[in-house]
Image: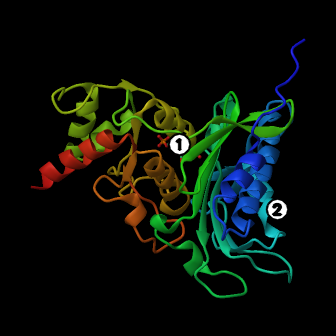
């Protein structure tokens, strides 16, 4: 029997080694990332057992978006909050599942970071054993002391100090950036650790996939229809024709396109004038990752990381992935305005 590799780079080792590059680092951000990795492992264990335990289906409650919560949504939300609330590293959190910002418990010290997350994105996939994900975003606080405030979480995405996601798929992966490359770790279930598997991910300039819910085609603007026709192959002189792939779980669609090259779109449409996805804890963190991997992200025309949120749960149209493909959509939309 082959023995396991003994010199693997665990996420803990990697985070510590990256921190050594910054003499001024206090280690707080590193520890916070490690707290999130711990929360992810707890969620991963529950997702893995979802088919075995009787925890499938709806918890009966609606979240503040008016969507029915799945039990695992509730569990994932609690797991992340608990992994971060007692450490003194965080001053405020915000979650897709909570209407208001979440302040940390007790009278202990409040940390310098504000963390936003979507604890279990794509949760309607759970019943079908399809991938789901967690997305997180970290900012330095703007408020001076005590509990953090809404102001700390309503920052433009370009202020992020770190962002990442966890994908619970055929394997569990955590991908994050602190602005020094995008790095991917795969959970090795035999040792219970995230192990470096995808160092320094770079996304191709133009990709082979486009991912969009094409059943909404008739509800898009004519310009958006034209852009997607470009991905079908209608303008080969301008953009490479692509294959269609759409899972309906943002993290899984984004991850495939990040690694293999491609573009994900959730445009505005007549039934959803601002699209479906949330700026603060879905679009912004993934945009931060896309840009640090050489890709791009817009709301069709404007850079996601420059948008200044005014509400915690606000939605934005999203076009994200390979740089040339994202630019192509903006070109077509601009031409229609000319
Ligand atoms: P659920 O959490 O309700 O499954 O929504 C998932 C999601 O927010 C995102 O992960 C998908 O990319 C997108 O919605 C899919 O939406 P459509 O079903 O409208 O294509």
Q: Is residue 96 above or below residue 222?
A: below
Q: Is residue 205 visible?
A: yes
x and y, in percent, of residue 3 in the image: 88, 19
Q: Which residue is painted at 73% across and 76% down in the image?
A: 111
Which residue does the image show at 87% across and 34% down from the upper left? 191
Q: Quadrant of residue 48?
A: top right
Circle 1 packing at 10 Å, graded few (<14), some (14-19), many (20+), is: many
| Residue 19: quarter of image | bottom right
Residue placed under numbered mark 2 in the picture: 82
Q: Quadrant of residue 324?
A: top left
Q: Which residue is mark 1?
A: 250
Nearer to us in this view, 49 or 24: 24
What secondary structure is marked by label 2?
A: helix
Residue 110 image position (x, y, % from top left): 76, 79
Nearest to N terminus: mark 1 or mark 2: 2
Q: Report if residue 212 is visible in the image.
A: no
**Residue 49: image tag:** none
Residue drawn where x is 42% and y is 62% of the image:
305
Point out the image quarter for the C terminus.
bottom left
Q: CA distance from mark 1 to mark 2?
A: 24 Å
- Between 283 and 111, the one nearer to me in the picture: 111
């Amino acid at each position: 029997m082959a023995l396991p590799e003994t010199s693997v780079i665990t996420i803990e080792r990697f985070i510590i080694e990256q921190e050594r590059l910054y003499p001024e680092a206090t280690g707080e951000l590193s520890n916070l990332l490690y707290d999130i990795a711990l929360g992810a492992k707890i969620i991963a264990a529950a997702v893995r057992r979802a088919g075995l335990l009787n925890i499938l289906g709806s918890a009966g409650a609606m979240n503040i978006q008016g969507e029915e919560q799945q039990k695992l949504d509730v569990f994932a939300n609690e797991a992340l909050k608990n992994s971060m609330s007692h450490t003194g590293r965080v001053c405020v959190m915000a979650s897709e599942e909570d209407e208001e910002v979440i302040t940390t418990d007790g009278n202990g010290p409040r940390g310098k970071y504000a963390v936003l997350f979507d604890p279990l994105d794509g949760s309607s996939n759970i019943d079908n054993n399809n991938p789901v994900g967690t997305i997180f975003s970290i900012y330095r606080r703007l408020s001076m002391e005590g509990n953090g405030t809404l102001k700390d979480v309503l920052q433009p995405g370009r202020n992020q100090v770190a962002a990442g996601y966890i994908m619970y798929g055929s394997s569990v992966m955590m991908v994050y950036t602190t602005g020094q490359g995008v790095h991917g770790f795969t959970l090795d279930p035999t040792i219970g650790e995230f192990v470096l598997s995808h160092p320094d991910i770079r996304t191709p300039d133009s990709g082979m996939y486009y991912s969009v819910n094409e059943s909404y085609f008739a509800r898009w603007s004519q310009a958006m229809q034209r852009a997607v026709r470009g991905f079908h192959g209608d303008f080969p002189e301008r953009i490479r024709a692509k294959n269609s792939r759409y899972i309906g779980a943002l993290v899984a669609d984004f991850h495939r396109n990040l690694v293999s090259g491609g573009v994900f779109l959730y445009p505005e449409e007549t039934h959803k004038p601002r699209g479906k996805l949330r700026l603060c804890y879905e679009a912004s963190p993934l945009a931060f990752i896309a840009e640090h991997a050489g890709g791009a992200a817009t709301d069709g025309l404007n850079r996601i990381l420059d948008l200044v949120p005014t509400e915690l749960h606000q939605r934005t149209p999203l076009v994200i992935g390979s740089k040339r493909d994202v630019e192509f959509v903006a070109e077509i939309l601009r031409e229609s305005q000319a």
